Image (spheres, coloured by chain):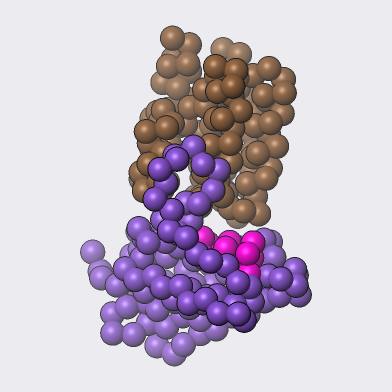
């Protein structure tokens, strides 16, 4: 499966919904979407990984890159994910300490709206 | 089970084919779903390194993958044509954009070795296949 990227806005916060597989082949499209949002002045971003079947370190690198970009504007990237196999990759690499990870989009939006 | 081999161009669009080849083979060795994810993940990391660092002739370079189930273990060998000095990142900088691949391979497989020579790098990995 390829990677599908859908962007919607909840309470004016952009939510990037990913579906499929994120690797070195597909991750550049996610990177472009994150850069586009930052260029539009969106510095609070939610990335929903609930429909992601596979992700490797290339995907993590792009998410960290996005986080670094928004942090220069005092922004944040929050993750939505309950899939154990995807969460495991964040744990292995210590990124559970870097990203706030939520069970659903509502919780992520509420956290960013605080 | 007989050893199976695959040789593909070292290009990123082949990465999914590479990890699914090993995943399908491991599935035939009765790996569990969790083990299959770990195996696909480790193969994706090793093949990404092979494509990015082990292809001096671009899409003319090849990545060779072989796998075999033997004595309860899945053995995987991935070789490329480049010289890449593998470094195990301790990830002191969690905000680094890269350097996580080898850490992931070491965390998901039971054995990982890197053999570097002037004709290429060979990554050998093994995973114990136990039914849960």
Q: Horizontal placement of A41 versus A75: left or right?
A: right
Is B39 situated above or below B95? below
Is A43 situated above or below B19? above
Residue drawn at 47 percent across, 31 percent down: A79
Q: Horizontal placement of A63 versus A39: left or right?
A: left
Which residue is at the front of the view, B127 or A83? B127
Which residue is at the front of the view, B23 or B118? B118
- What color does chain A have in the rendering? brown
Residue A46 at least partly seen: no
- Residue at the outermost top position: A114
Residue drawn at 60 percent across, 17 percent down: A73
Q: Is residue B48 magenta?
A: yes
- What color does chain B have in the rendering? purple
**Which secondary structure type mostly characterizes the magenta part of the structure?**
helix
Please identify the quadrant where the N terminus of chain B is shown. bottom left
Q: Horizontal placement of B100 versus B48: left or right?
A: left
Residue B119 at least partly seen: yes
**Residue A15: where, in percent of width, then height?**
57, 26
**Residue A66: where, in percent of width, then height?**
59, 32
**Residue B108: where, in percent of width, then height?**
36, 60
Magenta span of residues: B44-54
Residue drawn at 36 percent across, 48 percent down: A92
Which residue is at the front of the view, A77 or A19? A77
Residue drawn at 69 percent across, 65 percent down: B11
Please identify the quadrant where the C terminus of chain B is shown. bottom left
**Residue A44: where, in percent of width, then height?**
56, 19
Q: Horizontal placement of A100 versus B20: left or right?
A: left
């Amino acid at each position: 499966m390829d990677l599908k990227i859908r962007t919607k806005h909840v309470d004016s916060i952009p939510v990037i919904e990913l579906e499929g597989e994120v690797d070195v082949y597909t991750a550049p499209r996610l990177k472009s979407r994150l850069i586009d949002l930052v260029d539009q002045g969106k510095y609070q971003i939610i990335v929903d990984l609930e429909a992601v079947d596979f992700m490797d370190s290339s995907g993590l690198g792009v998410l960290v890159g996005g986080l670094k970009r928004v942090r220069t504007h005092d922004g944040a990237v929050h993750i939505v994910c309950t899939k154990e196999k995807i969460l495991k990759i964040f744990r292995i690499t210590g990124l559970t300490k870097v990203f706030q990870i939520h069970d659903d989009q509502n919780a992520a939006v509420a956290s960013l709206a605080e | 089970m007989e050893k199976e081999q695959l040789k593909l161009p070292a290009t990123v669009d082949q990465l999914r084919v590479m990890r699914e080849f090993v995943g399908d083979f491991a599935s035939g060795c009765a790996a569990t779903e969790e083990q299959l994810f770990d195996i696909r993940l480790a193969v994706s990391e090793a093949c990404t390194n092979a494509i990015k660092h082990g292809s001096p002739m671009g899409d003319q370079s090849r990545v060779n993958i072989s796998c075999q189930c033997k004595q309860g273990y899945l053995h995987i060998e991935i070789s490329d044509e480049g010289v890449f000095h593998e470094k195990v990142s301790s990830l002191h900088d969690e905000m680094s954009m890269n350097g996580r691949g080898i850490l992931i391979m070491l965390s998901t497989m039971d054995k990982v070795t890197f053999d570097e020579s002037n004709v290429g790098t060979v990554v050998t990995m093994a995973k114990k296949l136990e039914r849960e």
